[in-house]
């Protein structure tokens, strides 16, 4: 089956720890994206990548880092510098400049 | 930055009723997308619109790309309980460069359907 996988579904961390969220796609899409969703709000773009070894900051990149070493993978690290990391994180991919974005199932991160 | 206003914020309807929601923008978009999100899941694409004035249907769903390219609406006919969820509009510009593929999302419409 083609699709986007995110793991784990739920993640718990202590404040001050870095944590890496996984996103893998087998859709052969060039572009991948990370969004953050808070309760009652829409999605906000954290980072995106158009091609391997290249990525751009989105609207709320502070406190986050990414890498794109493989076309299939776009991991997101939530660093200790992110002041309010508890949220629902969504990964998406698209196949071209005007192609639709398809989303993974999300990872709910709770930091205490 | 670009802003999308989605309304209504929430709707409570009876099964069988029709539903309408819309999004307006202060800026022009090249593409409008409508997504549905179930609790704790990722959004699922419902309809994509690429041309001003375009009217597209997907089963009981109908969406239109406004003539001004600054608005879009989604209609759901004869609602059923599984229509429950959050519906998001999203506008996309493809100006190239750093705007590549970026979506701007509305705040969402929470739909509740009473059997």
Image (cartoon, rainbow, N blue to C red):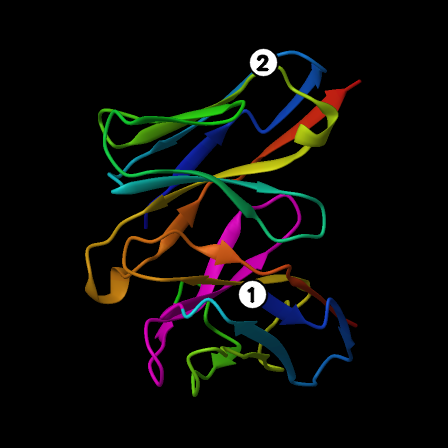
Q: Is residue A74 magenta?
A: no
Query: Which mark lies nearer to you, 1 or 2?
Result: 1
Nearest the camera: A25 or B4? A25
Name the subunit of mark 1.
Answer: A
Q: Residue at x 50, y 71 (%)?
A: A26
Q: Residue at x 54, y 24 (%)?
A: B8
Residue picked out by circle 1? A4
Number of numbered discs overlaid on the protein picture: 2
- The stretch in magenta equals A29-57
The circle on residue B18 is: 2
The residues tagged by marks 1 and 2 sit, at their Cα atoms, a distance apart of: 32 Å
From the viewer's perspective, tell me whether residue B47 is left or right of residue B114: left
x and y, in percent, of residue B67 in the image = 23, 24
x and y, in percent, of residue A102 in the image = 48, 55
Name the subunit of mark 2.
Answer: B
x and y, in percent, of residue A39 in the image = 66, 48
From the viewer's perspective, tell me whether residue A80 is left or right of residue A32: right
């Amino acid at each position: 089956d083609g699709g986007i996988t995110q793991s784990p579904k739920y993640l718990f961390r202590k404040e001050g720890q870095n944590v890496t969220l996984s996103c893998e796609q087998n859709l052969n899409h060039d572009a991948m994206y990370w969004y953050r969703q808070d309760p009652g709000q829409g999605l906000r773009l954290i980072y995106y990548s158009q091609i391997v070894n290249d990525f751009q900051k989105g609207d709320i990149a502070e406190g986050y880092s990414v890498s794109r070493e493989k076309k299939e993978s776009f991991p997101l690290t939530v660093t200790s510098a992110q002041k309010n990391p508890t949220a629902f994180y969504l990964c998406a991919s698209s196949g071209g400049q005007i192609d639709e974005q398809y989303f993974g199932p999300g990872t709910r991160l709770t930091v205490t | 930055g670009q802003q999308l206003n989605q309304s209504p914020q929430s709707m409570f309807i009876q099964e069988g009723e029709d539903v309408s929601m819309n999004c307006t923008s202060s800026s022009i978009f090249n593409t409008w997308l409508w997504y549905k999100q179930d609790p704790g899941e990722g959004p699922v694409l419902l309809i994509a619109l690429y041309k001003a004035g375009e009217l597209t249907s997907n089963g009981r769903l109908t969406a239109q790309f406004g003539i001004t390219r600054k608005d879009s609406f989604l209609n759901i006919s004869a609602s059923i309980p599984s229509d429950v969820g959050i519906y998001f509009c999203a506008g996309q510009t493809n100006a190239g460069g750093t705007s590549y593929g970026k979506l701007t999302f509305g705040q969402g419409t929470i739909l509740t359907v009473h059997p």
